[in-house]
Every structure is written in structure tokens, then in C-alpha cells.
Amino acid sequence: MWKWTADNAKGVVVMIHGAAEHHGRYKWLIEMWRLEGYHVIMGDLPGQGTTTRRRGHILSFDEYIEEVEEWIREAKTFNLPIFLLGHSMGGLISIRALEEKELDVRGVILSSPCLGLVKKPNKAMDILSKGLNVVMPSIRFDSGLSVKIATRNKEVQDMDENDTLYVTKVSVRWYRELMKAVEQAFFQIKKYPNIPTLVMQGGEDLIVDKIYVRKWFDQLQIREKSFKEWDGLYHEIFNEPERDNVFETARRFIDAHIEES
């Protein structure tokens, strides 16, 4: 876990990265929050980034939830309003953590949350993965994720080309736990707390199926929720060429709820 502090801070943003990536890919976004007067707390999820133990592998999705709980506990030491921002799998982790735990957060931003995949294994492979999950759960395969299908931003693509921390192989157990978490995100949706939530989704997402994101959002029964689809943007909306506009929307959402205090 790392902390980036701002002068005269008015709140704390806890950020959760997506599958395969790590906190180092969020330097631009971290600095943007700092300049707007927000402390930022973020770490690398188990099996990803600098946490090289069991690279691309987890025993349970709960490992992610427990890690995020620790980040939020650290955020509370600032005695400021806390906001949760989860991208892709980080969005799914945010949802599952909020459904299962009592987290003291003022608002939530979900960036292209992983609530369904555009490309899924065929039926035979899916059945095989269930068997392998029992007998060989740590066996790994290519994730199929690449920065070129994640963002149109050439600058980000070039930076990621030589990124040795980018996870390219994931385990069978990781995949099965991800799929189970997606199912639970829908099944347990009534447990999602009444916390203001902004969902932002790339309109041309090649990784997460936006139909399922919208389906989950429509089923969400809370007093304040908003949905923004960014036409033409790929999966990593905070890395796209239009990211200044995306950030401005996120900033306005958080600023509005800071002012409520």
C-alpha cells in the first residue's frame, strides 16, 4: 500500500486497479486527485504488480476484499471523507466488498466494472476449467488481456510495452473466482449499501461487456446513482485521449459529496 498526500486535503480517494495491472499505471490519475486536494491510497492487489507471490493466482476472491479493507482502514486515519474508485476488476472488488462488508465510504465510482466479459471461453473450456479448479487450480494460461484493446492512447500503449509488472498469465482458480464474484455481484445486489454511486463505462469497451454493466446498474436500488457511457472510449476510460473530461466528471461527483458534509 502507498499513500500520496495533498496540501489542505478535503478527502481521501482509495483506488483499486484492474486485472493484470498495478498501481504504477495510475500516476496521472493519482496526481490529478492530489492537485484537486485529495489524498490517494492505493496498492497492488494480491498476485499482481509488486506482490509477486503467486503471480496471477489467488486462492479466493476474498483476498482482494480483505486487501481493500486494509486500505480503507488506513484511509480512515486521515479523518476525512473517503471515496472508493475501482476500475474493471477493481470495480467488481468494490461492489463485492460493499455487498459483504460495512465500509465507511462517502461515495463510489465504478470505472468499466467487470460485470461480464466480451470474450469468454467456449462451453467446453468453461467446463474443463471447473474440473481443473479442483485438481490443478494453480495452472496458468494466457489472460488474453493487452493494453492495445484496453486503450486507444498511444502514449500509454508505448509505456506498457516494456512493463515487466504486467501480468500476462492467470490461473484457473483466478478465473473461476472472478466468474463466481461476477455472479455474486448480481445475486447479492440488494446488499449493496445506500451510498451515492457513479458508474462510468467505455462505449467501445473490448474487454468488459457493457450490456451487463448496464443491467447491474438498472437493478441497483439505491437513492442516488448515475450512469455515464463514454461514446467511442475503450475500456480504460481514465487512460483514453479524452481522460481529462472523464476525470472532470469524476471530480464533480466527489466534490459534490464533499460539500454535503
Image (cartoon, rainbow, N blue to C red):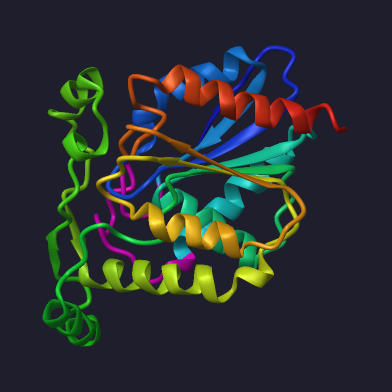
Q: Is residue 138 above or below residue 113?
A: below
Q: Is residue 112 above or below residue 211?
A: above
Residue 153 located left or right of residue 183: left
Residue 210 located left or right of residue 165: right
Q: Nearer the viewer, residue 226 or 51?
A: 226
Q: Position of residue 56 (x, y in %)?
A: 25, 57
Q: Which residues are magenta?
A: 45-62
Task: Count all numbered tags in the image, as a single digit.
Answer: 0
Q: Main secondary structure of the magenta part?
A: loop
Residue 36 located left or right of residue 54: right
Magenta segment: does it hold 243? no
Q: Residue at x 13, y 77 (%)?
A: 125
Q: Position of residue 126 (x, y in %)?
A: 19, 78
In the image, farthest residue toward the front: 231
Magenta segment: does it hold 54? yes
Q: Position of residue 86 (x, y in %)?
A: 50, 44
Q: Residue at x 21, y 47 (%)?
A: 167
- Quadrant (top left/top right/bottom left/bottom right) for the C terminus: top right
Q: Residue at x 32, y 32 (%)?
A: 232
Residue 133 located left or right of residue 260: left
Give residue 81's quadrant in the image.
top right
Q: Residue at x 16, y 49 (%)?
A: 168
Q: Nearer the viewer, residue 91 or 71?
A: 91
Q: Position of residue 145 (x, y in %)?
A: 19, 48
